[in-house]
Amino acid sequence: MMIKQSTLISMALVALTITGLIVLLSGGPVSAQSDGLNLITDTPDEGYALAVTLARRGVSTTQPNREVLFSLREEYAKDAGLLIASSRVIAIHFATIAEANDHWR
């Protein structure tokens, strides 16, 4: 059985989501606030920005070679399925952050 490349990349993006959360929760370099490492933000906009940061950090943590990282960008930038998959990663992060912030109530 052959797995499509887009399926493999989608699976990798989910793994990156998990990696980003592990990095954040284990004392990694991403911070929502300057006073500590957490998922708490003042506004939904800040929460979304943190979700994007987590997704990007997950990618750069998984592929630290910037030359390889940037060479792949042209491939996924033209693939709607891969772009949707990367949006899914951000959405998962944002849902987690929103839950941590009690949906900013």
Image: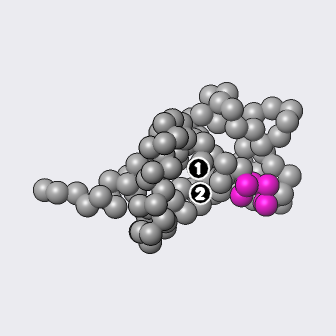
Where residue 9 sits in the image (x, y, percent)?
Answer: 38, 54
Q: Is residue 73 left or right of residue 49?
A: left
Q: Which mark is residue 65?
A: none
Whether residue 25 appears in this view of the structure is no
Q: Is residue 79 left or right of residue 32?
A: left
Where residue 12 sits in the image (x, y, percent)?
Answer: 40, 48
Write the residue at 17% across / 57% down: 2
The residue tagged 2 is 90
Write the residue at 59% across / 49% down: 55
- Nearer-the-camera pick, 69 or 5: 69
Neighbourhood count class around disc 2 (C-alpha, 10 Å): few under 14, some 14–19, many 20 upward: many
> Is 19 rendered above or below residue 80?
above
Secondary structure of the residue carrying tag 1 is helix
Residue 63 shown in magenta: no
Whether residue 79 appears in this view of the structure is yes
Asked if the residues shown at circle 1 and circle 2 are in contact, with their CB atoms under 8 angstroms apart, the answer is yes
Secondary structure of the residue carrying tag 2 is helix
Q: Is residue 54 left or right of residue 13?
A: right
The residue tagged 1 is 55
Check disc 1 and give the amino acid type: Ala
Would you say the magenta stretch is mainly helix, strand or loop? helix
Check disc 2 and give the amino acid type: Ile
Write the residue at 40% across / 57% down: 10
Write the residue at 62% across / 28% down: 26
Image-quadrant location for residue 92: bottom right
- Nearer-the-camera pick, 27 or 56: 56
Magenta residues (range): 44-49
Whole-angstrom CA distance, mark 1 to mark 2, is: 6 Å
Where residue 23 sits in the image (x, y, percent)?
Answer: 60, 34
